[in-house]
Image: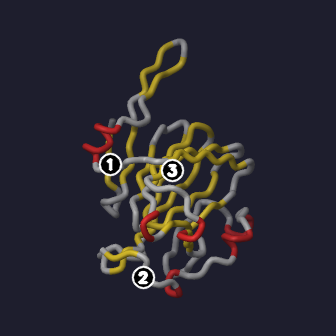
């Protein structure tokens, strides 16, 4: 497995090895020991699977706070996404900065988004499926978010903002400057 640190070093991109032949391929997408050695702590308590039917579906920017704060290990078995992590740890030298990576079935990358980071993605292809492991259970009361197009964050989404497909909830999230300190570095 190849591991790469992005410009915010706590966010990792991994490439699990694929072994292929005429029948197809085999890949170990999660191995507790190997991922722990790479800096991904776990344990994971839940797997989530999302399907987006159209290109330009944007989900985010989300996180959970408190004892159910989540780290996320994201992969794409079909289609492609632009995946983004935003550092919201007050006192961090990278507070308010974002990093992104294309994660797809073709490139077979996975991205680790640690606790203390907002997470979001947009689909780059129709019928895209996203699977992600999380380190804490879903807790509606702990859910928080920031608007996807917050100009102070300045995420460079690779879709037309005018045609982004959003949930009603994601359309009305606050700007980061209007949020309390959820995490501290």
Please report the residue visible at 74 percent of the width from the left and 50 percent of the height from the top. Answer: 54
Give the residue number, with chain letter if any, for mark 3.
Answer: 102
Q: Is residue 8 above or below residue 46?
A: below
Marks 2 and 3: which is nearer the front?
A: 2
Q: Nearer the viewer, residue 90 or 43?
A: 43
The outermost residue toward the left is 37
| Residue 7 as seen in the image, left or right of residue 149 | left
Query: How many neighbours does mark 3 have within 10 angstroms: few (below 14), some (14-19), or many (20 or more)?
Result: many
Tag 1, which secondary structure? strand
Give the residue number, with chain letter if any, for mark 2.
Answer: 181
The quadrant of the picture occupied by the N terminus is: top left
Query: How many neighbours does mark 1 have within 10 angstroms: few (below 14), some (14-19), or many (20 or more)?
Result: few
Query: How many neighbours does mark 2 have within 10 angstroms: few (below 14), some (14-19), or many (20 or more)?
Result: few
Give the residue number, with chain letter if any, for mark 1.
Answer: 4
Please report the residue visible at 67 percent of the width from the left and 68 percent of the height from the top. Answer: 161
**Sequence order check: which comes first, mark 3 or mark 1?**
1
Please report the residue visible at 55 percent of the width from the left and 80 percent of the height from the top. Answer: 151
């Amino acid at each position: 497995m190849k591991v790469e640190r992005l410009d915010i070093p706590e966010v990792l991109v991994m490439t699990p090895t694929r072994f292929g032949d005429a029948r197809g391929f085999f890949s170990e997408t999660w191995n507790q020991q190997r991922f722990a050695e790479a800096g991904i702590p776990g344990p994971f308590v839940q797997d989530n699977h999302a399907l987006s039917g159209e290109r330009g579906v944007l989900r985010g920017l989300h996180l959970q706070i408190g004892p159910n704060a989540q780290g996320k290990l994201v992969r794409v078995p079909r289609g492609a996404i632009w995946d983004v992590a935003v550092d919201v740890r007050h006192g961090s030298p990278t507070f308010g900065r974002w990093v992104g990576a294309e994660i797809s079935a073709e490139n077979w990358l996975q991205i680790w988004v640690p606790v203390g980071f907002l997470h979001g993605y947009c689909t780059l292809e129709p019928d895209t499926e996203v699977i992600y492991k999380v380190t804490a259970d879903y807790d509606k009361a702990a859910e928080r978010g920031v608007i996807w197009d917050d100009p102070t964050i300045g995420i460079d989404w690779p879709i037309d903002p005018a045609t982004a497909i959003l949930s009603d909830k994601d359309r009305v999230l606050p700007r980061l400057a209007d949020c309390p300190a959820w995490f501290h570095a």
